[in-house]
Image: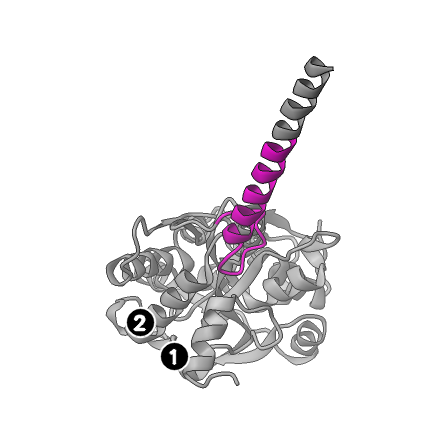
């Protein structure tokens, strides 16, 4: 009997120790969810920002934003590395998967992600929040005078760069070409980054290129400097209306003088570039500091599009999209939202 009592006493002590350990673990689990995370992932301070292809605006802008944030945010272990990527689609997907913590993307692509349409059909995107609207982008359809191409209708049977894999330009290009009755197989598609597309257009490998990019684009300026014969193709009439009706794009005019050598207006469509962040891996406080820094210090950046990052357009094109809690806190503080 004494032996049995001793075993029961030891068992009771072991049970008490296990229960105590469980209670302690539950407390730690609650603490790890602080800052808006659900506890499934911890927030981090060393961040990777997906940008775009070399030759576009996302890539240099991402580099400047990364440096701006590092120079102005004093958080232990804080770092931002900007990396080349396929742009909008890839950046959103990799923020969702946890491979990126920040990324630049078109608002049209983010809308598709939230609505699970297009490239995101059947895919749940619920870990990505808007930090800010950055600047308007225009779809540029570019050729050279020497090709003899006068309009988008003339691209049937031609070699056309439709943007890099993982970007939004490809979807825009296919949408526009379809509006002009040109479907897949009616032209030879080149999935090129903007810099490579410029080179191929310059050396005659392709006949035209599509690029959704901030204007003025340095790549287009470089092409004009090298060839002196850049020609923009207009998106207009019924085709323009069809594109607007079937997408989140809006009609837009690139006014004369946007490029120093541009004499005529260009009819096209526009979207907004957004800075996005992980709502799981980027804490509310860190996102707040990044948003505040971006709007208060944007003038420290040298890229032309930086002057378009203003409080007045802080959420243009993003009003119906999920905000990162840290950005929401900042926008309420300055009165952008109630």
As drawn, the residue found furthest toward the front would be 2
321 to 22, vertically: above or below: below
Relative placement, left or right, of 239 versus 144 is right
Q: Are marks 2 and 1 in contact (CB under 8 Å)?
A: yes
The disc placed on residue 298 is: 2
Rate crowding at label 1 as few (under 14), some (14 to 19) or many (20 or more) other CA atoms within 10 Å: some
Q: Is residue 99 visible?
A: yes
State the image coordinates of residue 259 (x, y, percent, origin top left): 35, 74
Residue positioned 70% across, 52% down in the render? 123
Q: Circle 1 is placed at which residue position?
A: 310
Tell me the SS state at disc 2. Answer: helix
Of residues 93 and 220, which is closer to you in this image? 93
Relative placement, left or right, of 44 versus 338 is left
Q: Is residue 161 magenta?
A: no
Task: Answer with mark 2 or mark 1, whichever residue precedes in sequence.
Answer: 2
Of residues 40 and 135, which is closer to you in this image? 40
Residue range (magenta) = 15-42
Q: Quadrant of the N terminus?
A: top right
Q: Quadrant of residue 8?
A: top right
State the image coordinates of residue 6 (x, y, percent, origin top left): 66, 19
The disc placed on residue 22 is: none
State the image coordinates of residue 270 (x, y, percent, origin top left): 54, 73
Residue positioned 68% across, 70% down in the render? 247
Residue positioned 51% across, 67% down in the render? 325
């Amino acid at each position: 009997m004494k032996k049995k009592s001793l075993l029961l006493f030891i068992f009771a002590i072991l049970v008490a120790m296990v229960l105590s350990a469980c209670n302690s673990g539950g407390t730690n689990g609650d603490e790890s969810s602080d800052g808006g995370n659900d506890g499934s992932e911890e927030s981090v301070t060393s961040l990777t920002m997906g940008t775009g292809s070399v030759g576009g605006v996302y890539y240099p802008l991402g580099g400047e934003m990364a440096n701006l944030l590092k120079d102005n945010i004093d958080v232990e272990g804080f770092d931002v590395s900007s990396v080349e990527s396929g742009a909008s689609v890839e950046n959103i997907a990799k923020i969702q998967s946890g491979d990126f913590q920040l990324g630049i993307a078109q608002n049209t692509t983010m809308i598709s992600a939230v609505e699970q349409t297009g490239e995101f059909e059947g895919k749940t995107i619920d870990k990505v929040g808007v930090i800010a609207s950055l600047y308007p982008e225009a779809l540029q359809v570019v050729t050279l005078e020497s090709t003899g191409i006068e309009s988008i209708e003339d691209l049937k049977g031609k070699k056309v760069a439709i943007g890099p894999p993982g970007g939004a330009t490809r979807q825009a290009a296919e949408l526009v070409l379809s509006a002009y009755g040109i479907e897949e197989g009616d032209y030879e598609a080149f999935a090129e980054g903007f810099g490579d597309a410029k080179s191929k257009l310059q050396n005659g490998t392709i006949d035209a290129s599509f690029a959704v990019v901030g204007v003025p684009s340095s790549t287009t300026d470089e092409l004009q400097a090298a060839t002196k014969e850049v020609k923009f193709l207009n998106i207009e009439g019924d085709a323009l209306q069809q594109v607007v009706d079937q997408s989140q794009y809006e009609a837009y005019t690139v006014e004369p003088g946007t490029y120093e050598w541009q004499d005529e207006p260009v009819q096209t469509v526009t979207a907004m570039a957004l800075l996005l962040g992980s709502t799981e891996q980027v804490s509310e406080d860190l996102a707040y500091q990044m948003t505040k820094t971006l709007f208060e210090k944007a003038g420290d950046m040298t890229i032309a599009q930086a002057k378009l990052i203003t409080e007045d357009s802080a959420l243009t094109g993003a009003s119906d999209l999920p905000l990162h809690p840290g950005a929401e806190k900042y926008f309420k503080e300055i009165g952008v939202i109630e």
